[in-house]
Amino acid sequence: MELGLKGKRALVVGASRGLGRGIAEGLAAEGCHVLLAARNVEKLGTIARDIRARCLVEAEAMELDLADPSSVDACCARALALGVDVLVNNSGGPPPSDALGVAADTWRRQFEIMVLGVISLTDRLVPPMRAQKWGRVLTIASSGVIQPIPTLGMSNTLRAGLVAWMKTLAGEVAADGVTVNVLLPGRIATERIAELDAAAAKRLGGDVDEISRQAASNIPMGRYGAVEEFASVAVFLASEKSSYVTGTMVRIDGGLVSSI
Ligand SMILES: NC(=O)c1ccc[n+]([C@@H]2O[C@H](COP(=O)([O-])OP(=O)(O)OC[C@H]3O[C@@H](n4cnc5c(N)ncnc54)[C@H](OP(=O)(O)O)[C@@H]3O)[C@@H](O)[C@H]2O)c1
């Protein structure tokens, strides 16, 4: 299927590893130029070189710290100068926490990274998409938005707020050919998930493989998802072929969330 992504340009946040990297590589494989953003610009540089060599598209590394408004400004300026058709919002996950007992400063800091940083970026990059009557905004959230995950209180809460903002935005820009959708990973095998499993093994005093096996047994498909399985849904939603899909959340979770 021709996805209509050739020659378009995407800004992918959190492209230095995991889901963001997988999406950037998936888009580039379809002929989309990519601007890769995250804090670790050295790692991004290596990924960009590899993408340029393999996919014959433009790939540029861009330092971005969502916690720093001046860094967000600089990233927006570069993205606006190049012209961005597809924005993939992503950030690091917050530390585990209960609902109770989180310090106000911790809430504020995580809000600035996960919500305000993403809103600021989107706020600046969507107007040119509207003007050209074509754009795609994708945001990586979590299955915890539908089925809150115990021990991830901050993630459940802040991501739900961001999803509400994205849904509001979707209605505002739909008539201009800009679609706004949210991706909900369940448990996709990235370094972050490996780190979380290792932390759980340490906390519970168990074996990390046993922890992973137990987590996978709670997923109807009986396994973690692969980054490529997640990225292929994102690439479709970024494409021309998804032109009538907006304001929605798509679960990529192997059936993990139990509600319809
Ligand atoms: N994998 C899953 O199954 C799963 C499930 C539910 C939710 N999620 C969420 O989906 C997102 C991506 O997941 P992942 O597994 O790919 O996570 P990951 O491996 O930790 O990747 C996070 C990416 O975000 C970047 N990042 C972190 N803090 C940043 C900041 N302040 N400014 C800019 N970039 C920043 C990181 O790069 P630098 O360190 O170089 O900045 C990295 O590229 C996370 O928020 C995660 O919590 C994932």
Image: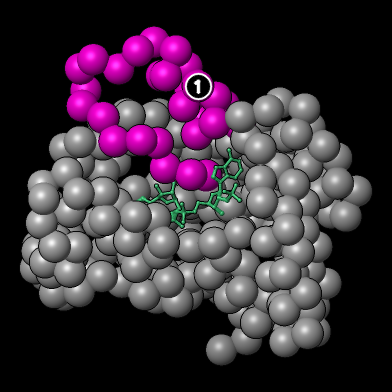
Residue at 82 percent of width and 37 percent of height: 74
Residue 225 in sight here? yes
Is residue 107 located in the magenta-colored stretch of the structure? yes
Q: In this rendering, would 24 be left or right of 171?
A: right
Q: Where 219 sits versus 200, above or below?
A: below
Is residue 24 located in the magenta-colored stretch of the structure? no
Q: Where 148 sits versus 34, above or below?
A: above
Q: In this rendering, would 162 be left or right of 80?
A: left
What amino acid is found at the position of numbered circle 1 in the picture?
Arg
Residue at 72 percent of width and 34 percent of height: 72
Position of residue 153 measured from the top left corner of the image (x, y, whole percent): 26, 30
Residue at 13 percent of width and 74 percent of height: 222
Position of residue 154 measured from the top left corner of the image (x, y, whole percent): 33, 29
Residue lying furthest right: 81
Magenta extent: 91-117
Q: 3 or 42: which is nearer to us?
A: 42
Kindly identify which residue carries mark 1. Answer: 109
Q: In this rendering, would 115 be left or right of 210?
A: right
Residue lying furthest top: 104
Q: Secondary structure at mark 1?
A: helix
Q: Where 173 sits versus 112, above or below?
A: below
Mark 1 Cβ and ligand 1 under 8 Å apart:
no
Where is the N terminus found, in terms of image quarters?
bottom right
Where is the C terminus found, in terms of image quarters?
bottom left
**Quadrant in which residue 7 is drawn:** bottom right
Q: 79 or 128: which is nearer to us?
A: 79
Position of residue 37 measured from the top left corner of the image (x, y, whole percent): 69, 52
